[in-house]
Structures are given as structure tokens and as C-alpha cells.
Image: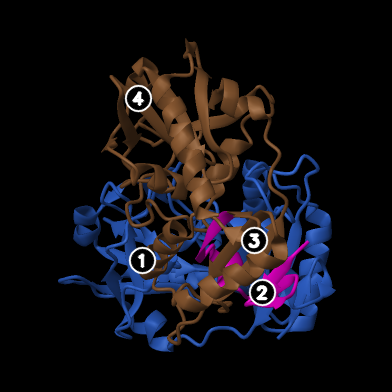
Chain colours: A blue, B brown
């Protein structure tokens, strides 16, 4: 397994790292295709925003060079990048001298069944709700116990993903995906200002054409013409089953899948 | 620095640990006095509860033996214990084969000014709110970005602690302490079923006599006869200043400080 700590081969991090102590950091899960980290401009934008919000220093140019070097060694696979606030074993206060640590972990691309994209997926209705925390909403930070609890709710392989609502009952996202619905050919994705992760594939898709960002109740989701989920590793999965509701794979979803493939090809 | 990983001397954890990846674990900050981990029964109870809620396996007897061995080597100081779900680099789903990892980090007792306990403290009003997540409320888990953001709000050394409210505006706890108020000699501490950490000193104090657990609005806090904060390292600090409000150190607070000292002496 390819593993770098701060740009050097290494398999371990100091036990006093604040990422371990407090989840004090961010991460990215990057599809690397033939040495190229995909959707890099979107990733860098999200990392810059997250680091700014958490006041974690980030040398973007050095990081981009490192991701390319890592991608070249990895070839094709997944590069998981973790950026933490570095060491600091006691006390929540960020150290006066700001620092950070980078962890890069390479692994093979996940082998999802091709039917998920072709024929659609059944989505589990998670009971675990997302707490509403505007100060952390949108960020891909390391505080992920809600996702761990939600993903532990089902083991039935019939479900490829789980849908998470916020504590107000609004549909927000999948456990590891973002959500889109289609209403009268209009694309809508949930607002993420209270909670949720602003996924890189979501951002990339939104950059290609009109898409409204709105609160989406479960009732509204269930009444939608089409529903799909996306992330930057698997692209787009049409949702064909959620609770007692069934959908056919719609024309807008198919169009967005073509756009998604193009995005990944262009970026790689 | 004394540092053990799974009972062995070691300074690093595998980069694929789920504690780092997702904050998937729990921690305890234990005052060790002359080799004795203080308030151990309360700690073990909290750890057992937390591990049960997160489905992390815990061998309590082995852990207690390890804490005593570690305490003996440390002498007097702080033992920070981190328990994670162990390795698992990709995917939120807990591994089918449940495992865990223990990290023990020794450090000196923090040197708080003795005036904090004697004369009371000024408490900062944090703008960072605690999100309401009943599934995680009470646990001392590793998802602590809210505390990191809250503690980063002030650098003025005049403030020894910061008070955190939940998103509903209720006073819940300090950044690293629990909160008590006194109304007509009656002891009240905030309910922690929506958010907050059920501190070990809070539990220990509650075990010694009557104490009501209720929602406490900021207005109610400000109208209280006495206010104090506690944790298991510093004991009890009377609150004498919060926003424009001033308190004298009251008789109930002094009585609770005596009880607190007794608890620490008995447990050590």
C-alpha cells in the first residue's frame, strides 16, 4: 500500500496528532486515473475553503505538486488525503504556531457493480440524523461519527447507499454521496448550509448547467420525477428504490451521467 | 513523554486508524495521583456506555490493569486514553471483525492558577454552538471540532473557560468543563440528552447528593445564585463573571469544592 506522511514514505502518524485527538482536520477521497488526480480544481477549492474555515495553514502549490507525484506513483486508484492541524496532545486550543500534517493513502479503485450505474440502486432510509451545525456544514472534515453510525445501520447488500435526513427531517445526502432530484426536468440538490458535505462531484455537476439549491423534504423527494446520487469515485447512480417508492431511470439522470463521464475524462 | 499503543511503548499509530479517519472512538483525560488513576469507576462506566453505543469492543478488565500499570509508571500526571475502532482506511462501515486500539499518553498535571478555585473565574461567552445530536450526546467521543472552534474564539487570558450553548440557545457546558448552577440552595446541571459531554466529575458530584438535571436558559443561568464549573483535572472553579453578570463565591459552591476534594482523595 502506498502511504506518505508529509510527502515522505511512512505508515504511521504521531499519537499526539490533533486529527486523532479531535478529528481536527479535513480529508479528500480522490480518484486517480493514469496518474492524474481527478477533479483537482474542485478539490483544491474545497480544501482551501475548509482550511480557511478551520484556520489550518495550507500551501496549495506544494500540495498540488505532491498530489501529482503521488498520483504518478499510484497510477490508477484512490488517493485518500488527510490534512490535520498537526501535533498538540492536550487542550482544544489550536497551537499558537499554526502547523499541519498531510497523510496520503493509496488504494485500488472500489469495484462497484456496473448495474448500480446502469440500472439504478435501492437506497436505505437511515434513522441516524445529521445534526445541524452551520459552522461545519459543507466541509469534508474528520468528524464523521454520524456517517459511521448511519453506515452501520444496514448490512443488506440490496442497498447500495443510505439516505440521511437532518434533525429537521429534510433529505440532505447519502452516507457517502450527494443527492439530486429532478422535478419537471429541473435539477435540484439539497441546501448544505446546516449540515452535509459539499461533494466535489456535486460541485462539478452544478458547474455544468442550471441547478437549484433548496431544502428538500422527504415527501418532495418521494414525489420527484427522478432521483440520483453522485460522488467522485462512482459518478452517478440513479435511485430506483427508496422505501415504497419506485422510479425508472430518467432522461435527465442519463444526461447527467454522460456529463459526469465527460467531467472525469476531461479532468484525467 | 510516556506513550503506549495497545499496552506497548510506542509513539505512533497506523495512518489507517479510524480514530484519525473519522474520529471513530472515545477518549478520557485521567488525573493520575501517586500512580492511581482517579475516579476510575466513573470512567469505566462512561467508557463502557460509550463503547456500547458505538459498538466498539472493550475488554474492561484488561483496560483497568493497563491503566494501573500506566499510572504506576507515570506517577503523578495526566493519562490521556484514546480508544479507537482500530484500522480501516476506506469506507464508513465498521469492519465486520470488530476490533479496537488503545493509546495512552502521559503528561504533567496542568498548572492552573490556584486563584481560579479560590477566587473564581471569568467565563467567555462562546459564539460556537453545540449541534443537537442525541445519538452522540453525553459521550466523550473523538469528534471535537466544535470544541476546537469554541476554544479558538478567545486568547484573552482573563477568561479561564468558555460557556457553550446548544443551537437552541440553552447553556450546556464549558469547552472543557461541565456546568452547575445553584438556585435557592438547589443544585442544577444542564441536561445532556441533546449534546454535551457527561463529564466524570459531574457524574461523581451528582452521586454525592441531590442535583436536578434540567434545561438551563442563559437567562436562568444569569439569574442563578451561584454558578460553577467542574472537571476531573481542576476540580471546581466558581464562576464570578459572565458577560455583565457578577457573582460572589457562594456557600454551596464551597461545600461542593470540599466534596470534590474528598472524591479525588478517596479515589487516589
Residue at 34% of width from left, 35% of height from top? B189
Q: Residues within 10 Å of mark 1 (few under 14, many from 20)?
A: few
Indicate which label's residue lies in the foreground, 3 or 1. 3
Inter-mark Cα distance, 1 to 4: 32 Å
- Of the two numbered discs 3 and 1 on the same chain, state the one appearing first in sequence: 3
The subunit letter for the residue under badge 1 reads B
- Of the two numbered discs 3 and 4 on the same chain, state the one appearing first in sequence: 3
Residue identified by numbered label 1: B53
Indicate which label's residue lies in the foreground, 3 or 2. 3
Residue identified by numbered label 3: B35
Indicate which label's residue lies in the foreground, 4 or 2. 4
Inter-mark Cα distance, 3 to 2: 19 Å
* Image disc number at residue B268: none
| Nearer to me, A17 or A202 | A17
| Nearer to me, B41 or B199 | B41
Secondary structure state at the residue bearing disc 2 = strand
Amino acid at each position: 500500500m502506498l502511504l506518505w506522511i508529509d510527502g515522505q514514505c511512512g505508515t504511521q502518524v504521531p499519537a499526539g496528532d490533533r486529527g486523532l485527538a479531535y478529528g481536527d482536520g479535513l480529508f479528500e477521497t480522490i480518484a486517480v486515473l493514469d496518474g492524474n488526480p481527478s477533479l483537482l480544481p474542485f478539490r483544491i477549492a474545497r480544501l482551501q475553503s475548509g482550511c480557511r474555515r478551520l484556520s489550518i495553514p495550507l500551501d496549495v502549490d506544494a500540495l498540488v505538486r505532491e498530489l501529482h507525484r503521488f498520483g504518478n506513483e499510484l497510477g490508477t486508484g484512490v488517493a485518500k488525503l488527510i490534512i490535520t492541524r498537526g501535533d498538540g496532545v492536550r487542550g482544544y486550543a489550536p497551537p499558537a504556531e499554526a502547523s499541519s500534517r498531510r497523510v496520503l493513502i493509496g488504494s485500488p479503485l472500489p469495484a462497484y457493480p456496473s448495474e448500480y450505474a446502469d440500472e439504478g440502486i435501492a437506497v436505505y432510509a437511515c434513522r441516524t440524523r445529521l445534526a445541524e451545525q452551520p459552522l461545519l456544514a459543507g466541509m469534508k472534515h474528520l468528524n464523521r461519527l454520524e456517517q459511521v453510525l448511519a453506515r452501520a445501520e444496514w448490512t443488506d447488500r440490496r442497498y447500495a447507499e443510505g439516505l440521511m435526513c437532518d434533525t429537521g427531517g429534510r433529505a440532505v445526502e447519502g452516507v457517502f454521496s450527494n443527492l439530486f432530484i429532478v422535478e419537471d426536468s429541473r435539477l435540484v440538490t439539497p441546501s448544505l448550509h446546516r449540515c452535509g458535505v459539499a461533494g466535489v462531484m456535486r460541485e462539478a455537476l452544478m458547474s455544468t448547467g442550471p441547478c437549484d439549491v433548496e431544502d428538500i423534504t422527504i415527501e418532495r423527494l418521494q414525489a420527484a420525477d427522478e432521483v440520483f446520487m453522485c460522488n467522485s469515485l462512482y459518478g452517478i447512480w440513479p435511485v430506483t428504490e427508496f422505501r415504497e417508492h419506485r422510479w425508472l431511470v430518467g432522461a435527465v439522470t442519463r444526461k447527467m451521467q454522460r456529463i459526469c463521464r465527460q467531467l472525469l475524462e476531461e479532468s484525467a
